[in-house]
């Protein structure tokens, strides 16, 4: 599955516009499931456009508690971002490396709302299978990103 994620990301990146607008690193909390929270870390790249594409690699740390056990989940996503005066909404697809109690498919949808001010971005993201099969709890990520 790791090879498939890398192959998909490389295919998309090779077909994206060559101009680089920003690279971002991000951290943030992930919502609680059965009273157990987690955290996320991301690396993303945006194309240079008014309404850019975002390519993201990330992980959601494992939950290890008697109430909830999930492994670390790695994901790669591609989203289209629609912007207006710093605010944005975005949606796209994501691939994950594992099938957990929270994310039941390897293919997910990534949606988000946020605000960008200079180098900083804060956003609320949702990663789930959009009820296309299996369990559909999904993960909610509050993400703070810094661009350079």
Image (cartoon, helix red, strand yellow):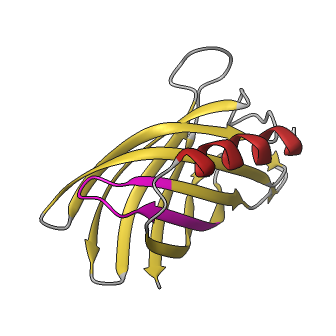
- Residue 138, percent from left and from top: 58, 37
- Residue 139, percent from left and from top: 57, 45
- Residue 9, percent from left and from top: 68, 47
Q: Is residue 19 left or right of residue 15?
A: left
Front in this rendered view, residue 142 or 84:
84
In the picture, the quarter occupied by the N terminus is top right
Image point (68%, 38%), residue name = 95
The answer to whether residue 37 is magenta is: no
Front in this rendered view, residue 73 or 34:
73
The answer to whether residue 52 is magenta is: yes
Q: Is residue 49 left or right of residue 147?
A: left
Q: Is residue 68 visible?
A: no
- Residue 126, percent from left and from top: 47, 44
Instruction: Decide: is 77 above or below 46.
Output: above
Q: Is residue 3 left or right of residue 56?
A: right
Q: Is residue 19 visible?
A: yes
**What is the chief secondary structure element of the magenta stretch?**
strand
Q: Which residue is the extreme one toward the top?
A: 133
Q: Give the mark count.
A: 0
Image point (44%, 74%), residue name = 22
Q: Which residue is the extreme one toward the left?
A: 85
Instruction: Decide: is 130 above or below 42.
Output: above
* Stretch in magenta: 41-54
Front in this rendered view, residue 74 or 16:
16
Q: Quadrant of residue 99?
A: top right
Q: Quadrant of residue 84?
A: bottom left
Image point (58%, 57%), residue name = 56
Image point (19%, 67%), residue name = 86
Q: Which residue is the extreme one toward the front?
A: 18
Instruction: Decide: is 17 above or below 93.
Output: below
């Amino acid at each position: 599955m790791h090879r498939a994620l890398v192959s998909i990301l490389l295919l998309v990146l090779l077909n994206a516009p060559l101009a680089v607008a920003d690279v971002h690193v991000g951290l943030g909390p992930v919502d609680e499931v059965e009273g157990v929270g987690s955290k996320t870390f991301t690396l993303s790249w945006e194309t240079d456009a008014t309404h850019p594409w975002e390519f993201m690699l990330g992980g959601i740390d494992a939950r290890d508690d008697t109430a909830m056990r999930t492994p670390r989940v790695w994901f790669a996503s591609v989203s289209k971002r629609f912007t207006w005066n710093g605010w944005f909404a975005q949606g796209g697809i994501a691939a994950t490396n594992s099938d957990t109690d929270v994310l039941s498919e390897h293919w997910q949808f990534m949606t988000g709302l946020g605000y960008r001010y200079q180098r900083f971005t804060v956003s609320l993201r949702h990663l789930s299978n959009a009820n296309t099969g299996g369990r559909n709890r999904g993960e909610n990520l509050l993400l703070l990103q810094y661009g350079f």
